[in-house]
Image (tube, rainbow, N blue to C red):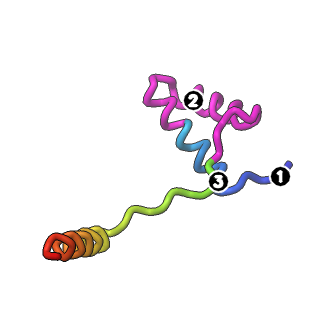
Amino acid sequence: MAKRTEIENYAISRKIVRLMREGFPQDQATAIAFRMFKDGELPIPRQPKQKRQTRRQRMDAYMKRMKSKNLRRRR
């Protein structure tokens, strides 16, 4: 049997967490998630999510937007 990709493992683990938050015990949540994967019911994202920007990157982007906004107002 072919091995699962990293993104498939990620989708399965996120589904397990979601099911546990809904109140299923861990064993049952795991069984449900793997059955959903096997039956093709589990949505697999095409690309892994982008990692969140660092605080510095967010601040730099914010300052850049504010500068351009202020320049447009002065015209």
Name the residue tied to disc 2: 29
Segment tinted magenta in the rendering: 16-44
Identify the residue position indicated by label 1 in the image.
Answer: 2
For the residue pair 54 and 24, the one nearer the viewer reads as: 54
Give the residue at x 55% y 37%: 15
Viewer-side residue, 42 vs 22: 42
**Mark 2 residue element:** helix
Judged left or right of residue 60, residue 31 is right
Residue that numbered label 3 is attached to = 46
Q: Looking at the picture, how far across and down is residue 66, in whole percent?
A: 20, 70
Pointer 3 or 2: first along the chain: 2
Callout 2: few (<14), some (14-19), or many (20+) C-alpha neighbours within 10 Å?
Answer: many
Q: Position of residue 1 (x, y in %)?
A: 86, 48
- The residue under the point 16% across, 70% down is 73
Type of amino acid under label 1 = Ala
Q: Quadrant of residue 41?
A: top right
Task: Say if 73 sits above or below 39 in the image.
Answer: below
Q: Does the magenta run of residues contain 68?
A: no
